[in-house]
Amino acid sequence: MDGPLEWFAALGTIVAASLVAADLGRRWTGWGFVLFMAVAITWIVAGLRSNSGSLVIQNGALLLINAWGVWCYLISPKRRLSSGEH
């Protein structure tokens, strides 16, 4: 379980966490959540390929949490208007 798929997911997770932690504004944080969603899907695929149920369940939950982050930071009109960013 150390192929290109897993390396993409691992490096993508590091970049996404860096974007969220850097606090560069709502838009950048939102894109961090988008990347988190992409790598969660990648981890789910890797987990299915290696029969790792715990990895699939964990990243399924993280996918939903990160979708909520995308909604809050990029999509929700209420949150975007209150922050003053466009």
Image (cartoon, rainbow, N blue to C red):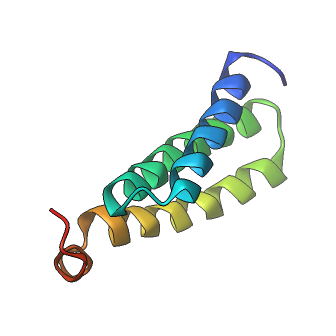
Q: Place residue 4 in its image quadrant.
A: top right
Q: Position of residue 34 (x, y in %)?
A: 43, 49
| Residue at the limit of the structure toward the top, as seen here | 4
Q: Nearer the viewer, residue 70 or 61?
A: 70
Residue shown at 50%/41% (left/top)? Answer: 38
Residue shown at 61%/50% (left/top)? Answer: 17
Q: Is residue 46 left or right of residue 18?
A: right
* Above or below, comparing residue 73 to residue 83 in the picture: above
Q: State which quarter of the image contains the C terminus.
A: bottom left
Q: Position of residue 47 (x, y in %)?
A: 75, 39
Q: State which quarter of the image contains the N terminus.
A: top right
Labels in figure, total: 0
* Above or below, comparing residue 26 to residue 36 in the picture: below
Q: Is residue 81 left or right of residue 44?
A: left
Q: Is residue 65 left or right of residue 67?
A: right
Q: Position of residue 53 (x, y in %)?
A: 81, 50
Q: Position of residue 22 (x, y in %)?
A: 54, 54
* Above or below, comparing residue 43 to residue 53 in the picture: above
Q: Nearer the viewer, residue 77 or 38?
A: 77
Q: Place residue 76 in its image quadrant.
A: bottom left
Q: Nearer the viewer, residue 71 or 85?
A: 85
Residue shown at 25%/77% (left/top)? Answer: 83
Q: Is residue 54 left or right of residue 76?
A: right
Residue shown at 59%/47% (left/top)? Answer: 18
